[in-house]
Image (cartoon, rainbow, N blue to C red):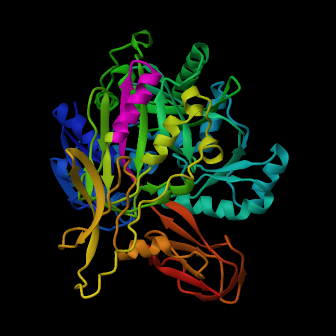
Amino acid sequence: MLKKVLIANRGEIAVRVIRTCREMGIATVAVYSELDRNALHVRLADEAYALGGQTAAESYLNTEAILDIIERSGADGVHPGYGFFSENTDFARAITERGVTFIGPPPEAIEVMGDKISARHAAEAAGVSGVPGNTEVLTTPDQVVSFGEQYGWPVAIKAAFGGGGRGMKVVETPDEAADALESAMRESLAYFGRDECYVERYLAWPRHVEMQVIADTHGNTLWLGERDCSAQRRHQKLVEESPAPNFPDDVRRAMGEASVKVAEACGYVNAGTVEFLYQDGEFFFLEMNTRLQVEHPVTELVTGLDLVEWQLRVASGEALTMSQDDIQRNGHAIEVRVNAENPAGGAFTPSPGTITKMVAPGGPGVRLDAGYESGDTVSQFYDNLVAKLIVWGHDREAARRRLLRAIDEMVVEGVATTLPADVAILEHPDFVDGTHSTNWVEKNLDLSGITAEVAPPAPAPADGEEAVPRVLRDVTAEVDGRRFQVKLWVPDLGDAVAVHAGKAGGGRAGGAKRSKAASVGGGSGTVAVPMQGTIVKVLVAVGDEVEAGQTVCVLEAMKMENNVNAEKAGTVKEVRVSPGESVGPGDVIAVIE
């Protein structure tokens, strides 16, 4: 068995791995950037080493720095988590060449399956058909247009070396091809360190159903069960569950057997996920994620298996102790992702900031995997996943109701979160009936009623009253013995300014600058950014005529690109930013008159 494991990652997955290692008596080594110096995973690990830098490229994607820390710490195993280097062949090979165990598949399997193009070839060779697509790396928008003309619009551009919806762009018309390809390549490079992309047919109303597999070095490969991950925004998952609703047993078995074929075809070892699109009774191979998935806890809750434990055991050379017939799936599990995003109006804009208060729900069948605690900061430079809330119930409806109860108990203050959108999903009849698809959130779900809780302007002091700074606070009061919770403007005594997030965790940090950012626009002619981030593209110049709603610039925050649009038509009088500049919430980037 491994003695000391370095986790080459951060956030909740690093915390998740550390906890299982501790239960197994395995020492842990954390690595951290300058911004993560006091992060939760650093606080929990037995040892922690600085990588330096702030951005992912400067820190968690710095191979030489990680290899140096492996040497200094004496770690005999490396767990890559997900994202970053988890599906990077060169990194896995660099680890194994030093005689250190890579807790994942062999580099050769990552090479085949980590590249989505070669993965399609491998799946087809194993007799598993994929969505129609072009297996050539895209170099010009003309290739996208040609494919769309042949197979019909829309089409999907995807990152060849990525997953999780990063670097994926849906192209509706030929005119969108150039901008979509450029954006997909930028996102892919920022998140995965490579910008190769390919194109495939975009199915109209599919479900995203994936199969968890695990394989050992003794020739055993098992499928553990499926997960439905169809509730998505920006092609990234919001809600995941197991088993999939309205999913026939014969299809489940066929998909499980197909997943084993795909895994065996590339010599796969350790835990992995084979993803499919399911539509009209048919399933199509989508890709294989050669790593642990964010949504792995729902499989753990219905099977009773600790997937991280089995990753460690398999990596240590142990054989699986169960057969396919031994795998039992009981009850139903549902997970919601708690991302630092503001879902107001369905926009899902990144919401970096400091979590001023975080309270976990409890009770039977409730699990919270979090990478942050009260006082921790969610940085614009990394993925915005704060936590995952997972519940188990004896059936799907029991799990759904339990999850709604748990969300109602959870409190997150200081940043906006996706929890209000999760509630809207869980309560919608389409989700209850299991008739939603990967397009459903953005096309059918009405999120117009969700608004950001931003502090209104502080009341002006009365005549003769000293102008003391005030801040909006939650105050508990009793009236005739009944408890009420109300908001009051009270004198600011110098403690941290925070706005109550509400039971659903949808709050965001207060303060003058944030309030200003929320109110900028309204036809004023000033174009301001709603969040902290980096300008990646400026689309207008002084003297240009623009229409209301036209994109002025593209802002990258939390590895996602966001369009910043003009709120009124007119002539561009000023452009105050250029690509590469960092901006904060409320910063004016252009003036239109």
Asked whether 37 or 310 is in front, the reply is: 37
Q: Position of residue 388 (x, y in %)?
A: 37, 41
Query: At 44% from the left edge and 19% from the top edge, which residue is drawn?
Result: 395
Residue 225: in magenta span: no
Give the tally of numbered discs.
0
The answer, for residue 320, to whether it is visible in the render is yes
Q: Where is residue 251 in the image (x, y as percent from the top left)?
A: 61, 18
Q: Position of residue 142 (x, y in %)?
A: 78, 59
Q: Which residue lies furthest to the front in this view?
A: 480
Query: At 38% from the left edge and 65% from the top edge, which residue is drawn?
Result: 55
Region rendered in magenta: 384-408
The answer, for residue 297, to whether it is visible in the render is no
The answer to whether 11 appears left or right of 44 in the picture is right
Asked if residue 296 is positioned above or below residue 352 in the image, the reply reads above
Q: Quadrant of the C terminus?
A: bottom right
Q: Where is residue 78 in the image (x, y as percent from the top left)?
A: 30, 44
Asked whether 450 or 436 is in front, the reply is: 450
Asked if residue 496 is positioned above or below residue 8 in the image, the reply reads below
The answer to whether 406 appears left or right of 224 in the picture is left
Query: Residue 462 falls in which quadrant of the image?
Result: bottom left
Asked whether 562 or 449 is in front, the reply is: 449
Residue 406: in magenta span: yes
Query: At 41% from the left edge and 60% from the top edge, which residue is drawn?
Result: 453
Asked whether 203 or 233 is in front, the reply is: 233
The answer to whether 329 appears left or right of 254 in the picture is left
Q: Quadrant of the N terminus?
A: top left
Q: Which residue lies furthest to the top in this view?
A: 325
Query: At 53% from the left edge and 86% from the top edge, which residue is drawn?
Result: 576
